């Protein structure tokens, strides 16, 4: 939980995809770098707002503002105070940091997708074999 007292929820990739299909106001933010988003691939429908990006690999000072822009015009489902925001990164670490920044800025209904896009490394140091969006065989795109 962040200092703002907003709980950062964790959600499975399959549950996130199911909610995205039933609630059009959900926003999926991919917080990986531009190159990861383009070259490794990304969940279908994701908006790329890097938390950390090249060339300096420092936290994006415009991250919260850019996410707020991505949320403009989203309509929340009945019974929700705001539209859900799902965050995804490679394996789940950057998403949590990004979620805490959003919560500190007053956003609520934030969830981090468990295992991220590629999941953690397995015993052979490979990704996509243990957990994550691709492991669950959910729709994704690549440039």
Image: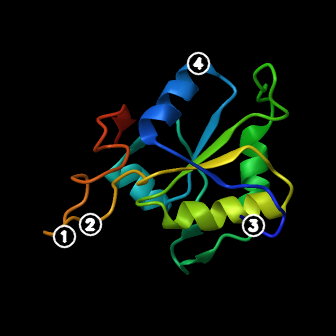
Q: Which residue is mark 3?
A: 2
Local secondary structure at mark 1 = loop
Give whichever of 90, 81 is nearer the camera: 81
Q: Look at 25% across and 52% down and name the residue there.
A: 128
Compute the Cα span from label 3 to label 2: 27 Å
Q: Quadrant of the C terminus?
A: top left
Q: Which residue is mark 4?
A: 22
Give whichever of 20, 12 is nearer the camera: 12
Q: Quadrant of the N terminus?
A: bottom right
Local secondary structure at mark 3 = loop
Quadrant position of residue 27: top right
Residue 118 vs residue 20: left or right? left
Mark 3 nearby-residue class (10 Å; few <14, some 14–19, many ≥20): some
Colour setup of the view:
rainbow
Upstream in the sequence, badge 3 or badge 2? 3
Q: Is residue 72 above or below residue 97?
A: above
Residue 125, numbered label: 1
Q: Is residue 17 above or below residue 91?
A: above
Q: Which residue is mark 2?
A: 121
Compute the Cα span from label 1 to label 3: 31 Å
On the image, the x and y values in percent for residue 62 come to: 74, 64
**Does the CB distance between marks 1 and 2 fall below 8 Å?**
yes
Q: Look at 51% across and 73% down and name the residue there.
A: 54
Upstream in the sequence, badge 1 or badge 3? 3
Compute the Cα span from label 1 to label 2: 5 Å
Compute the Cα span from label 4 to label 2: 31 Å
Compute the Cα span from label 1 to label 4: 36 Å
Instruction: Tell us which disc is closer to us: 1 or 3.
Output: 3
On the image, the x and y values in percent for residue 126 come to: 19, 63
Residue 143 vs residue 1: left or right? left
């Amino acid at each position: 939980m962040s200092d703002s007292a907003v709980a950062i929820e964790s959600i499975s990739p399959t549950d996130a995809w199911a909610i995205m299909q039933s609630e059009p106001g959900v926003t999926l933010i991919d917080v990986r770098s531009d190159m990861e988003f383009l070259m490794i691939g990304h969940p279908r429908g994701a908006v790329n707002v890097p938390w950390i990006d090249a060339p300096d690999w420092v936290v994006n000072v415009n991250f919260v503002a850019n996410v707020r822009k991505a949320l403009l015009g989203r309509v929340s489902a009945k019974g929700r105070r705001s539209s859900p925001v799902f965050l995804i990164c490679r394996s789940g670490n950057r998403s949590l940091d990004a979620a805490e920044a959003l919560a500190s800025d007053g956003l609520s209904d934030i969830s981090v997708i468990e295992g991220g896009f590629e999941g953690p490394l397995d015993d052979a140091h490979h990704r996509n074999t243990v957990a994550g969006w691709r492991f669950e065989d959910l729709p994704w795109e690549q440039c």
